[in-house]
Image: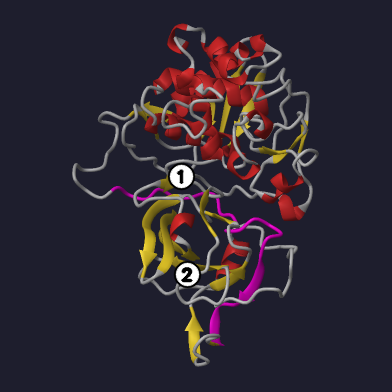
Amino acid sequence: MCCGSRSSATRSTDPRRRVVWKKIAVGVAACVLMFGPATVLLGVAVVMSPAAQYQCLPGGGLTVGQVPDSLTATTSDGVTITLDKAQLTHAAMIITVGGQTSGVGKQGVTVALMAALTESSLRMLSNTGTYPDSANYPHDGNGGDHDSLGMFQMRPQSGWGTVAQLMDPSYQAKAFFGGPSGPNYPSPRGLLDIPGWQQMSDGWAAQSVEVSAYPDRYARYQPVAEAIVAALAQPASGSSSQPSGSAPSVPETTRIVFPLPAGTWTESSPFGSRTDPITGQPDFHPGVDLAAPAGTPILAATDGRVVVAGMVDGTGTIKILATVGGQALSTTYLHMYPDGINVTVGEEVSAGQQIGEVGSTGHSTGPHLHFEVHPGGPDADPVDPMPWLSSHGADTENVPTSPGCMTSA
């Protein structure tokens, strides 16, 4: 089974392991409140903020509009709770992935939300008791249910994926929905792999994927899931205010994270004037170099849209366009190997999602990530990424695994 009975979960108090969720997401994305199995929500008291506008997505039946600051709802047995923006961001990501997956629709999204509410209260949970390295990935707290991880409490030992994969919220959503395009196809089975799931009750459909020891608990979250869908989702057909044929706008990100997992990197070359380590000539370094072992996951620092993904002048390059505080923002990630680029142009990504792997291509002396931040967009001047990340709530503290053992350009 991908989950066991959830009894309790505790938040990580280590500042190196905290995840800061700041505003809100862009076409996907990911508690501070702890909920046990007996607590959940409906009612719908929504506190709105200037949040992201999710755009129409290809191949799906739903889009996500504004994400509220909070949502109050009540379970089928009358327990009223309030979800915060971090939880609703995860819900928005599930709806977005469902909207991109053929055959899911509103019913499938509701089933997925019921499962995630039951298993984790819509939180990305690490599990340091079984997988200590899970705390190195963005997470909302630490769970302790056997070897389960993430929103859907999926188990690596059951074949759902690696720790790194299961600590990626979008991967978990894709795995839950399953189907021929699912990362776990054909086993373990996702929702689309369950024959006749549309004719089941939504609670039993969720149980058919989760295979829990407590099959009846999912149904009590149905009114909560329906409230979330009502508050966040809208049909894709005719729902976008974007003029036909125009380029899609970039929604505002509300979450900014460090682009490498804690404990994996060493700052090897700072932003600004320096002597080029290859040419020996003075130059201006428009980003920061973070030396890390080849294959280390590279994380999207913001929610956003991928505008470059591929080899540019021999250098593995990803550029992501976002909006922060109403201003365009471009982030650049360099030196991946060709097979270490995990996204494509036009793809919507969420902050903390793995987008690539550390490599050493182009102007490089060793495996590292060169990371740039351009407030104002890709043509604007860069700023020093480290203080920028810190000022926007990203955790820049680190315990290097092998300080000084690598050089990079």
Assess whether residue 31 is covered by the magenta stretch.
no
The mark lying in front, picked from 1 and 2, is 2
Which secondary structure dominates the residues rendered in magenta?
A: loop
Which region of the structure is painted magenta?
Answer: 248-274
In the image: residue 140, left or right of residue 181: right
Instruction: Specify the quadrant that holds the N terminus.
Output: top right
Q: Which residue is mark 2?
A: 361
Residue type, label 1: Pro
In the image: residue 180, left or right of residue 384: left
Who comes first in sequence, dot 1 or dot 2? Answer: 1
- Name the quadrant containing residue 329: bottom left
How busy is the neighbourhood of tag 1: few (under 14 within 10 Å), some, or many (20 plus)? Answer: some
Q: Residue at x 60, y 26 (%)?
A: 116
In the image: residue 183, left or right of residue 321: right
In the image: residue 213, left or right of residue 251: right
Element class at badge 1? loop
How busy is the neighbourhood of tag 2: few (under 14 within 10 Å), some, or many (20 plus)? Answer: many
- Name the quadrant containing residue 402: bottom right
Vertical placement of residue 48 versus 373, above or below: above
Q: Residue at x 57, y 66 (%)?
A: 388
Assess whether residue 264 is covered by the magenta stretch.
yes
Q: Residue at x 39, y 42 (%)?
A: 53
Q: Which residue is mark 1?
A: 50
